[in-house]
Image (cartoon, helix red, strand yellow):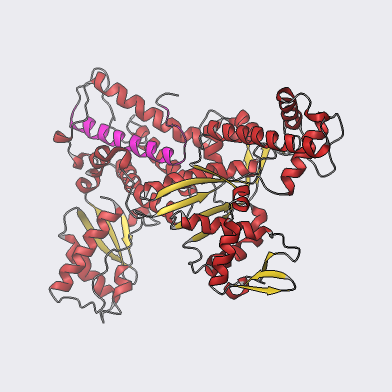
Amino acid sequence: MTPEQLSAVIVGALSSLSGAGTIVLPDGVPSEVLVERPKVREHGDYATNIALRLAKNAGMNPREFAQLLADELASADGIASAEIAGPGFLNIRVAAGAQGALAPQIVAAGASYGTSDLYAGQRVNLEFVSANPTGPIHIGGVRWAAVGDSLGRILTAIGAHVTREYYFNDHGVQIDRFARSLLADARGEEAPEDGYGGQYIADIANTVLASHPGAAALPDAEALETFRAEGVELMFTEIKKSLHQFGVDFDVYFHENDLHESGAVDRAITRLRELGMMYEQDDATWLRTSDFGDDKDRVVIKSDGQPAYISGDLAYYLNKRERGFDRCIIMLGADHHGYVSRMLAMCAAFGDTPKVNLELLIGQLVNLVRDGEPLRMSKRAGTVITMEDLVESIGVDAARYALARYSMDSTIDLDLDLWAKQDSDNPVYYVQYAHARLSAMLRDAPKLGVEIDESSFDPALLATEHEGALLRSLAGYPKIVTQAAELREPHRVARYLEDTAAAFHQFYNDGRGRQGVQFRVLPEADEAPNASHAARLMLVAATRQVIANGLGLLGVSAPERM
């Protein structure tokens, strides 16, 4: 029985009491009831405060209300007991058979277990990474690659149609600095004071020269354009290759330059003028963002007639909405906090709803540590730690898991020595090892005469403490997926997987006759298999499925052997 199923049982009990006139609910029976795991295991399997919430409106004492509900639940299928605690909490124990029945349901659902249609019909544009094509992706961008791709998978799991989009900044002063850096290297000159350094600059400059041998000797303007066009394309090709190797691919690569060349900026300004959101002052064109919570109005067209930076944001947001996206989610780095209020105000100026049609997620910094010392320099980039540096140190799976494991609001200090370990101290190894161990048990079972057979499965046989704990953990997976999606917090999935792996390892160790619990998950070679072995094998299969599903949401592999 999942929390959602228990909620439905409680709603049914409330409906029965209301229909019989035993309780009167002026606002009607709620459509769902919050049930949670109690902090103290001995209090029961689940707890709810619904009596406290509804009693006053029903004109009753909370404990009196709770007693009526407890009596009604006592006769409900799948409920072993319902006890009142404190001022009116209900502690509920689920019958072993009802709990165990979840295992074959998970096995039958397979990869779809934990998914829902909560966001069905919603089109989501998820923009992340969007690193400038002036160098390899640095560690901050790698964090967004891991978190953003995981969030896309999680939103898809609750029914959203997700488009992953990379905003390709090929317009502006940073690209000019990049081109000047390439040309300087090609001419054997020192890099510009505001330019880019590192071995990758020399590599790209040499590649341009290989295809355009005389490019460095061209007049400055012509040479710069050659190195700009060729260099940006080479750099961006490498960025896409690195992301693909990291398991991240985008549906759309949107070029900023297209906004300016297609007239999209002018269309956005015209739309805002029609909405009465623009005005002229000091020979410049302004947007009334202060009307929507920004600290000041923003210049869109400067007094010299050139578009300000926000002009591209206006055009890009409108473009996304015109492409039919209901939600536009943008992931930004820690240095973009000041960007949030103006963007949300821009959304409101278009007549949309901030934090619904447009969401901005801010991520914090990542620091890499080795031998207790912070890493500062990259072999290749020269100044920053890159995706390649991280993957070379700990591998793709560990890198993705480590970066997605923490709330995006927190700064991460990643200990590379820890994440490279091949033991249970390493969280991703701990979870993957659980999956590999589960897989091995499923491979060995047929050799020992144990098969998964739903027709003869007896859920009541899964009645030990650690079987119950593991089943309750598996039951919580759909709620975790929903929470991770709605709160935009993929780290909840990672932490859930670690808890579930721990519950499995406890169950497995008990099944080897440890801690005073004398049963075996699988029979010994000379032991006749029985119904209990088959029931536990069903639980094993369900657990492996849930761990595989969760790792899939994080873009991390679920190995069969380790």
Q: Is residue 462 above or below residue 327?
A: above
Residue under the point 27% across and 24% down? 445
Q: Nearer the viewer, residue 539 or 554?
A: 554
Is 61 left, or right, of 310 in this rendering?
left
- Image coordinates for residue 36, horizontal then vertical, percent: 35, 58
Q: Residue 353 at x, y = what percent?
A: 48, 67
Residue at 70% across / 24% down in the picture?
211
- Give yes or no for residue 532 being in the magenta stretch: yes
Name the quarter where the C terminus is drawn. Answer: top left
State the residue in front, 351 or 226. Answer: 226
User: Which quadrant of the figure has residue 225?
Assistant: top right
Q: Residue furthest left?
A: 20
Task: Please state if 400 lies on the left or on the right of 413 as rendered.
Answer: left
Residue 468 placement, left or right of 316? left
* Quarter assignment of residue 516: top left
Extent of the magenta region: 530-559
110 or 235, nearer to the observer: 235
Task: Give whichever of 449, 488 is nearer the camera.
Answer: 488
Q: Indicate whether 112 appears above or below 30.
A: above
Count the numbered circles shown: 0
Residue 108 at x, y = what percent? 24, 38
* Residue 380 visible in the shown view: yes
* 232 drawn magenta: no
Query: What residue is rendered at 57% in x and 58% in y?
Result: 315
Looking at the image, residue 87 sits to the left or right of residue 147; the answer is left
- The percent coordinates of residue 199 (x first, y second) are 75, 29
Residue at horizontal 85 percent and vertical 43 percent from the top: 193
Q: Considering only vertical position in the picture, is 80 above or below 504? A: below
Question: Magenta region's main secondary structure?
Answer: helix
- Residue 425 visible in the shown view: no
* Outermost residue to the right: 189
